[in-house]
Amino acid sequence: MVTAARELDPERTAVGIGIAAPGPLDPAAGMVIRMPNLPGWHDVPLATLVAEALELPARLHNDASLAALGEALAGAGRGASPLVYLTVSTGIGGGIVIGGRLFEGRHGLAGELGHILLDPAGPTCGLGHAGCLEALASGSALARRAREAMAAGAIPADSVLLALATDRPPAASMLAAAALQGDTWALAAWQDAGQALGRGLASIINTLDPERIVLGGGLTAAWDLWAGAMHEALAENAVTWPDRACDIVPADLGDDGGLVGAALWVAERLG
Amino acid sequence: MVTAARELDPERTAVGIGIAAPGPLDPAAGMVIRMPNLPGWHDVPLATLVAEALELPARLHNDASLAALGEALAGAGRGASPLVYLTVSTGIGGGIVIGGRLFEGRHGLAGELGHILLDPAGPTCGLGHAGCLEALASGSALARRAREAMAAGAIPADSVLLALATDRPPAASMLAAAALQGDTWALAAWQDAGQALGRGLASIINTLDPERIVLGGGLTAAWDLWAGAMHEALAENAVTWPDRACDIVPADLGDDGGLVGAALWVAERLG
């Protein structure tokens, strides 16, 4: 890996490796605490393992936190502070950047925004939290909801979604395709997800009063399906909305946000 | 007021007036945006009015934010960063201090922690938010819940609370007295409030990863009635609890936190 990078650009020297991984993790210790979707990953010293294998210093941080830094310094968050970033994808991760620097909190765990709590009666996320933002508005939450509704026979027989999901389990992308074809059940599911996202953002705004919120991750491709419900929930629940509001904009860097942020972050630490 | 202060200590010069008021308000403009419990207070330029009346520069900020600063610099939050402060009283206010400085957000509105959302099926606060922390765990939330239960005949006839509330409407202090005498209904109400507080703090911890949380306000006098339920909710919902946890401690400065913070804040700005 390092050799390949050196061959690509022999003029430049790698000062170290920045690793963007799903959280929760302990950046100071270079340690993955848990990976809810990867059993066996518990207190793994990933930074040390990579540093030894590649013979370069390595630093580890949460992928969403690093994407926040990437967007803040080189993407849709430039010039805004405080800047909040959310990845809305299979899971939901987040990051907070203040004055161009990643806000870490005491243990490097700040910005676990997928796990703010919204509804004690809601379904449970991979970490076991009932009704957190991730359990209500992530891609896996939408897919699980469709799966359960199909199993319960709660989706109308003429639904586009049923036709799309005949030979594969339902996924967020199918719900988007169905909603764009006018499927009522899928449209309502996106609006519920948008409402949960808006309520989550209202809690974040009431806590941090950010200048801008950048939304990335696969589900932002379906922006028009949920943005209306999100804005309604913001108007109801953010303390001074729409006066003294913040911009909510899509990410600029796509899937590369975490990599760009990792490079900028490790260069600052090791450069 | 200024004359009286000068007579108290003629050796010292007042550099200005710091005003701690309930939010939401706009510190940069010195403007009270709204006071949910005081109708007619809407976009009032309070700092200018006070400065003109007292012929000294005046600055305005949220009372809970200033209490956060007071506790961070001169109270139970000394040495901890990030430091989160919550007043749990008639309402619930908050403040965030990072590295000894008040974290303001874009418009000075950061730390409206009473209005993080916890339960869409919950009752409504004075600003109209369904199921926010203030609507579930404040003194007025407890009193309203007791009032509604009494009106519905849902409190057992031999309840201590009913005996205490025969000639006055129920208040949080009565619920505390009743619970301390073993009143089952009152005990359960405190535990529900403690659970809501714990879920709110879990959202705050998942967002900010604070080193310490300081709790002030009248309801902290009933600490033993709700702390157990609060800690259970934290263990369930804070991402890495109890590892990498934060201290949760009572405030040191009592009702003076906001005044101490206002003095420190305005001295830094005007001194």
Image (cartoon, coloured by chain):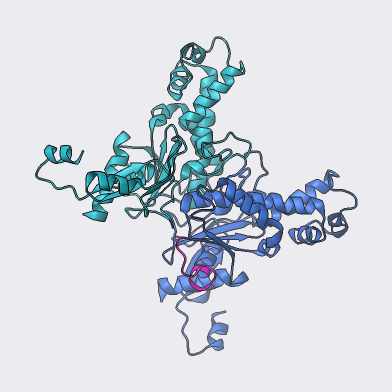
Chain colours: A blue, B cyan
* Residue A196 forms part of the magenta stretch: no
**Total number of numbered discs in the rendering:** 0
- Across and down, in percent, residue B80 comes to 34, 49
Question: Image quadrant for the N terminus of chain A?
Answer: bottom right
Residue sticking out furthest to the right:
A158
Residue closest to the eye, A169 or A43 = A169
Residue sticking out furthest to the left:
B11
From the viewer's perspective, is B269 left or right of B127?
A: left
Magenta stretch: helix, strand or loop mostly: loop
Residue closest to the eye, B145 or B183 = B145
Magenta segment: A71-83
Q: Is residue A103 visible?
A: yes
Question: Image quadrant for the C terminus of chain A?
Answer: bottom left
Q: Residue at x 66, y 49 (%)?
A: A136
- Across and down, in percent, residue A76 comes to 54, 69
From the viewer's perspective, is A187 left or right of B162?
A: right
Residue closest to the eye, A19 or B121 = B121
* Residue A77 forms part of the magenta stretch: yes
Q: Residue at x 56, y 43 (%)?
A: B117
From the viewer's perspective, is A132 left or right of A164?
A: left
Looking at the image, residue B37 lies above or below residue A200 = above
Q: Is residue B69 visible?
A: no
Write down the quadrant of residue A90 in the picture. bottom right
Looking at the image, residue B132 lies above or below residue A1 = above
Write down the quadrant of residue A173 in the picture. bottom right
From the viewer's perspective, is A61 left or right of B265?
A: right
- Across and down, in percent, residue B19 comes to 31, 44
Write down the quadrant of residue B237 in the picture. top right
